[in-house]
Image: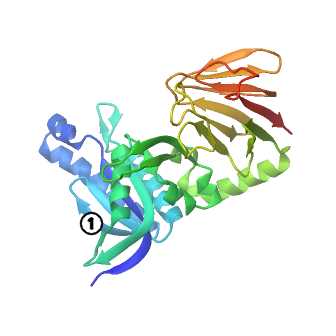
Amino acid sequence: MGKEIEVAILFADVVGSTKLYEQLGDLRARDMVGVCIEVMRAATDQNHGTVIKTMGDEVMSTFPTADDALNAAAQMQKQIALHPSLKVDEHTVAIRIGCNFGPVVLENRDIFGSAVHTANRMTSQAKAGQIMTTATMVEHLSNDWRASVRQIDIATLKGRSSEVALFEVLWQTEDVTSMVPAIAIASRDRANKKAQRMRLRYQGKEVLVDDGRANISMGRAEENDLVVKGNLISRLHARVEINRNKFMLIDQSTNGTFVIGKDGEEAFVRRDSMQIRGEGLIGLGKAPDSNSSQVIRYICED
């Protein structure tokens, strides 16, 4: 009889393994996939995880905490990206990883349940070198890991009737082997710097971006921090992040984002990022009008 437990679930697979076999032949490709599997296994073991099973070029593992799973995922990505035997015509063999957190049924050394399916779907949403995860997983992360996660899209997953927020883990920005010292240094640096925050106001709602909340999202989907409706506005239109005491606007939309500063200077960004300073207006999909109910007002404060 199965036992229900709550765990972090990780799926990792080799990107383009079929093409590898075509390019390199069966023996060499099998050896390279085998190296990837061993890296995945070792990272799981070294971060308190359990390898549930391997399936060809894929590994499924569980971890007691969300942080353990992301520590393992980041280790996998780093070690495979740097592994000397995983180079093909100057290109490195890559993996993609998907994670989720939730209840599963453990039976006969295997796990079952909707949380497992969602973790697997996260893998299919990831590109080479990416780690993708869910809002549920993010809720179970420590503040240190949560600061390295950003929402990048909203999608309907196979088998799910509702849309799901997709989060990317920015594993490249942290060295897994020195994560604790790096966090300590960053905290000390923040303590020595003047605190900064940005206020964004829209239709009576205000959100803050600061060290306690490093990013917010804007768009027409209900999952956003600022929900702005309009036929020119994408579901996940743009984000504002604080990075090294600078406020960055990152556009992910079809129609772009417009910014007008207090001095009247206009800027436009589409599928790119820009720094914003001082105070002014933000328009999603069209230039902001100070008299419009659709305008977002921002002000950067020390």
In the depicted structure, whether residue 186 falls above or below residue 5: above
Q: Quadrant of the C terminus?
A: top right
Q: Secondary structure at mark 1?
A: strand
Is 84 situated left or right of 212 in this image? left
Which residue is depicted at the point 72% across and 20% down?
Answer: 289
To which quarter of the image does residue 281 belong? Answer: top right
Q: Quadrant of the N terminus?
A: bottom left
Residue 179 seen: yes
Report x, y in % for residue 132.
44, 48
> Is disc 1 surrounded by few (<14), some (14 to 19) or many (20+) residues within 10 Å?
some
Given residues 42 and 207, the one toward you in this image is: 207
Is 249 situated left or right of 301 in this image? left
Given residues 69 and 112, the one toward you in this image is: 112
Count of labels shown? 1
Report x, y in % for residue 84.
36, 44
Which residue is depicted at the point 77% across and 21% down?
Answer: 261
Which residue is depicted at the point 60% across and 31% down?
Answer: 250
Q: Residue furthest bottom?
A: 1
Q: Residue furthest top?
A: 265
Q: How is the image coloured?
A: rainbow
Is 123 situated left or right of 254 in this image? left
Which residue is depicted at the point 54% across and 55% down?
Answer: 176
Residue 45 seen: no
Given residues 63 and 155, the one toward you in this image is: 155
Report x, y in % for residue 186.
72, 50
> Residue under circle 1?
53
In the depicted structure, whether residue 137 falls above or below residue 213: below
Look at label 1 and name its amino acid: Lys
In the depicted structure, whether residue 87 falls above or below residue 275: below
Report x, y in % for residue 157.
35, 48
